[in-house]
Amino acid sequence: MSGLPVEKPRQTWRGLWNISFGFFGIQIAFGLQNANLSRIFQTLGSDVGSLALLAIAAPVTGLVVQPLIGHFSDRTWGRFGRRRPYFLAGALLAALALLGMPNATTLLAAALLLWMLDASINVSMEPFRAFVGDMVAPSQRTAGYAFQTGFIGAGAVIGSLAPFAMARLGISNVAPAGEIPQSVRYAFYLGAALIFAAVLWTVLTTREYSPEQMRSFDDADAGREHETPIAPRGGWWWLLAGSAVVACVWWFTFERDLYVLGGALAAFGVLGLIAAAMVRGGGDNALVQIMSDLSRMPDQMKRLALVQFFSWLALFVMWIYTTPVVAQYVFHSTDTAAKAYNDGADWVGVLFSVYNGVAALAAFVLPVLARRIGAQKTHMLCLVIGAVSFASLLVIRDQQLLLLPMIGVGFTWASILTMPYVILAGVLPQHKLGIYMGIFNFFIVVPQLLVATVMGAIIRTFFPGEPVWTMACGAVVLVLAALAMLRVKDPTVAPNAAA
């Protein structure tokens, strides 16, 4: 006899802290990556138009790693728990990548280490999203994700600011042509130590609920644990679309970057066809389950996926192109060996630390606002603020004034990390939380892939030598994200109140 479903125990403030503290270290690593990726690649000889393509390994890896880790972490239980082994393994590998990346001497080595870093971070990060859902009661989910967002902001502040702080301590932020400055190297070494220590803290201070306890908490989901897979549809259309893109690139001699996009579309179609054939043959494996769950994605999640897609397009544009924009238009240098360029790159770290610091504080303000006007309107407002902030970068040429749009970006970033997950909280089945979080991350990774394959071609074709116009692209897609939110139902507002 299963008995009545049991409410999960409420977490204390310390419990919420311990559950999410590992994200602090993960975001230090992400902050270092985002603020210094362009700097490292340009130092090693990349031109601005090639920056996005060099980052291509990261999104491709994410498309594979995130759903697989989600799938297997949903089904893993051992001596060390369900999600925690993935946290620790990913943190260890990410620390090794952080130690190696600033010592790369070629673009290929830097790109390979970026692939290792991004894959490792994904191994740790993806289960953390599901971990909050595992460990907190529904009534505490907003607080749980707010804690996570707060640590994301705080960790990214340290990661973004670390090279600037090292330079202020007297460590040189310039180096001979083709070499990474010492300030960047030491910042990455610090990040390696902190990501491992922070994730280890969560691993050692938390104990996951056993499978039996999880079933007692989620009795309503118990009968859905062994759903019959369904055959995904549209595989031939995805294959045809990818093949058409590849053919157009070859026939019209478009930018070669677009081969990657066409290949990704075709590969997705092939995987869909393989999964469909396996389902018809009675097969049941990780690929079948992932493709089947993708086909079963709840409608609310589909609508939010479009919002995420546009939102993260803007974020990846910012992370990749802010350094060349600030260095060229505010510090008036494109020479990576010049002090002016490196001062500009350091200042980008400061700017990124500001928006992340604002996000860390806004994470606890936005739930209050959401209780007043609803999660949907809160997220729309923050997306519009982000669009205005991006647009202002087209005209601001003063170093200090650049801090203002970063405040707006901070609210947008906090909302992107919190509100979609609050809205999704009541939609996703608990026993598949990991896989659906992995699938939801498709719509974070796909924009990265699109920016990596298309944005370089846009720069070279429409505004060669003028990377500032990438910020206009970011503003436009944030407006589209805000408009897409109109289709998302708000579970935090009663139907009669919404009327």
Image (spheres, rainbow, N blue to C red):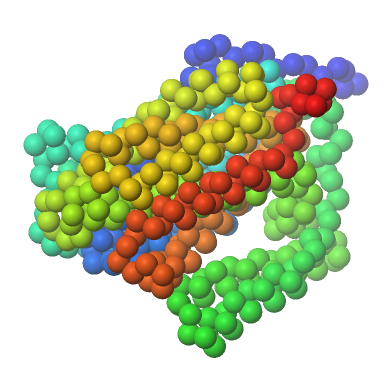
Depth check: 100 or 333 in front? Answer: 333
Residue 45: % across, % down: 24, 67
Q: Quadrant of residue 446?
A: bottom right
Could you tell me which residue is drawn at 39 percent across and 32 percent down? 407
Establish if 471 lies above or below 90: below
Residue 94 seen in the figure: no
Total residue callouts: 0
**Quarter of the figure that contains the N terminus:** top right
**Quarter of the figure that contains the C terminus:** top right
Establish if 406 lies above or below 47: above
As drawn, which residue projects farthest toward the front?
Answer: 395
Residue 447: % across, % down: 54, 55
Residue 63: % across, % down: 57, 56
Horizontal side of 360 relative to 344 (left or right) equals right
Could you tell me which residue is drawn at 17 percent across and 46 percent down? 343
Residue 226 seen in the figure: yes
Horizontal side of 52 relative to 275 (left or right) equals left
Depth check: 233 or 230 in front? Answer: 233
Depth check: 40 or 23 in front? Answer: 40
Residue 180: % across, % down: 19, 54
Depth check: 307 or 100 in front? Answer: 307
Could you tell me which residue is drawn at 18 percent across and 54 percent down? 332
Could you tell me which residue is drawn at 34 percent across and 69 percent down? 464
As drawn, which residue projects farthest toward the right?
Answer: 1
Establish if 261 lies above or below 222: below
Establish if 193 lies above or below 40: above
